Image (cartoon, helix red, strand yellow):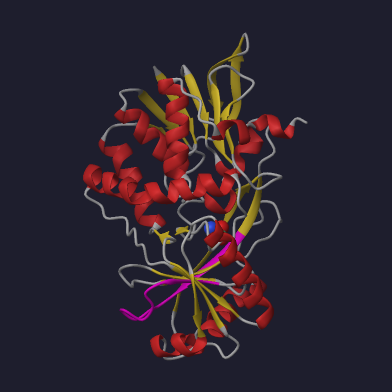
């Protein structure tokens, strides 16, 4: 069986790898270079608790994927020899006011009631660990199970897998139309080629809504990175000001991210970069002297309820794996599982009912 995967991001390449392992012929189509889209420009936090997700199916989905991550990255290491920087560093959510403290403590109680871990840390204890700390920080909540991965290394590894194992990649090929015959998927037509197959999986991130009739739209995020000293910060800081992600090899401190509904408007803006850098120095004032390594931006694939669209479409043979919004990196392992179970094992995960495109038809 030949599977056409539209989108060479974290979801598309992870799905391609799994179907290749299962013995399918897989082709990937991307409007740019595979591995270099929104997943390349993400932060790589694996942060269902720090994101403050409310109890429900989406939180369960995220937690299950977080639990799968270590094994997922280990398998990729075995396949490619590349360590993708998975780090169960934990994520600390600082409170910058008493009001924020109350909100964070309420979330912490909510998670504890679900049997999840987390603890409040007072400013006094933080001061013992960090030489400089923003003066407004009153303490914060630490979630030890939240983690991170170096999304760029992960994308390099998945790209390497595709190239090494001769997964055919049609790059710089913009999908213009999904061609059907008698209600069944037949092919995708790009601006350069006609690519047929038995099954198509649409994993085109923020561009998915331009290819199929589903409500997926971009939410732009600006990012930056500065130098960091070895051992300076051993967990992610995630607050209302910014999130700060020290890479496991201390090559950089990634700072994210703004959120704006401005369509596919390109470029970094003065206000965006100022917000990020102010967030950095409000957290760690001594970092005002650091060199800026890079500024960049990307587009999160959002849906009206900010949850993904997964599973069958109204076209036989066309499946969706898109709309992961802020959690695309986190949700790769579980998305691969529910999609391969559906197509390969013909087993429909209970999650698919909740994440069907049909919820938007009501
Ligand atoms: N996952 C963090 C973000 O989307 O900015």
Residue 279: where, in percent of width, then height?
58, 78
The x, y position of residue 311, in whole percent, is: 55, 29
Residue sitting at 51 percent across and 87 percent down? Answer: 123
| 231 in the magenta segment | yes
- Residue at (67%, 73%) from the top-left corner? 271
Is 236 magenta? The answer is yes
Q: Is residue 54 above or below residue 168?
A: below
Q: Residue 129 at what x, y percent from top left? A: 39, 86
Number of numbered discs present?
Answer: 0
Is any atom of residue 184 visible in this view? yes
Q: Residue furthest top?
A: 182
Decide if residue 311 is on the left or right side of residue 117. right
x then y, percent, for residue 105: 60, 71
Quick check: which quadrant has ligand 1?
A: bottom right
Numbered range of the magenta stretch? 221-238
Residue located at (25% from left, 52% from top): 82
Where the C terminus falls, by quadrant?
A: top right
Is residue 171 something one can see in this rendering?
no
Q: Nearer the viewer, residue 12 or 292?
A: 12
**Residue at image point 56% right, 43% down:** 205
Q: Please name whichever residue, 150 or 272, is drawn nearer the observer in this view of the structure.
A: 150
User: Which quarter of the image is occupied by the N terminus?
Assistant: top left
Up-down relation of residue 27 to residue 115 (above or below): above
Q: Which quarter of the picture shows residue 183?
A: top right
Q: Is residue 173 left or right of residue 306?
A: left
Q: Is residue 84 above or below residue 165?
A: below
């Amino acid at each position: 069986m030949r599977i056409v995967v539209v989108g060479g991001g974290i979801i598309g390449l992870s799905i391609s790898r799994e179907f290749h392992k299962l013995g399918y012929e897989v082709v990937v189509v991307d409007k740019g270079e595979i591995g270099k889209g929104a997943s390349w420009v993400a932060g790589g936090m694996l942060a269902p608790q720090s994101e403050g997700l409310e109890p429900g199916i989406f939180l369960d989905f995220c937690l299950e994927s977080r639990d799968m991550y270590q094994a997922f990255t280990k398998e990729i290491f075995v396949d490619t020899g590349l360590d993708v920087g998975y780090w169960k560093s934990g994520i600390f959510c600082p409170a910058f006011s008493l009001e924020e403290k109350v909100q964070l403590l309420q979330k912490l109680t909510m998670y504890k009631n679900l049997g999840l871990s987390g603890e409040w840390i007072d400013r006094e204890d933080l001061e013992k660990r960090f030489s400089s700390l923003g003066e407004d920080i009153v303490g914060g909540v630490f979630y030890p199970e939240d983690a991170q991965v170096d999304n760029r290394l992960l994308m390099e590894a998945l790209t390497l897998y595709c190239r090494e194992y001769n997964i055919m990649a049609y790059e710089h090929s913009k999908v213009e139309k999904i061609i059907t015959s008698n209600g069944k998927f037949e092919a995708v037509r790009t601006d350069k080629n006609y690519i047929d197959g038995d099954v198509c999986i649409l994993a085109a991130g923020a561009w998915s809504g331009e290819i199929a009739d589903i409500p997926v739209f971009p939410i732009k995020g600006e990012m930056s990175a500065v130098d960091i000293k070895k051992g300076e910060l051993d967990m992610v800081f995630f607050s209302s000001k910014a999130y700060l992600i020290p890479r496991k090899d201390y090559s950089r401190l990634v700072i994210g991210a703004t959120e704006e509904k401005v369509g596919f408007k390109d470029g970094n803006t003065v206000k965006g970069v100022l917000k990020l850098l102010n967030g950095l120095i409000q957290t760690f004032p001594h970092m005002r002297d650091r060199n800026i390594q890079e500024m960049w931006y990307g587009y999160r694939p959002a849906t009206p309820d900010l949850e993904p669209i997964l599973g069958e479409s109204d076209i036989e043979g066309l499946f969706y794996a898109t709309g992961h919004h802020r959690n695309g990196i986190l949700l790769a392992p579980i998305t691969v599982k529910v999609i391969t179970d559906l197509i390969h094992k013909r087993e429909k995960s209970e999650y698919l009912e909740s994440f069907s495109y049909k919820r938007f038809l009501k």
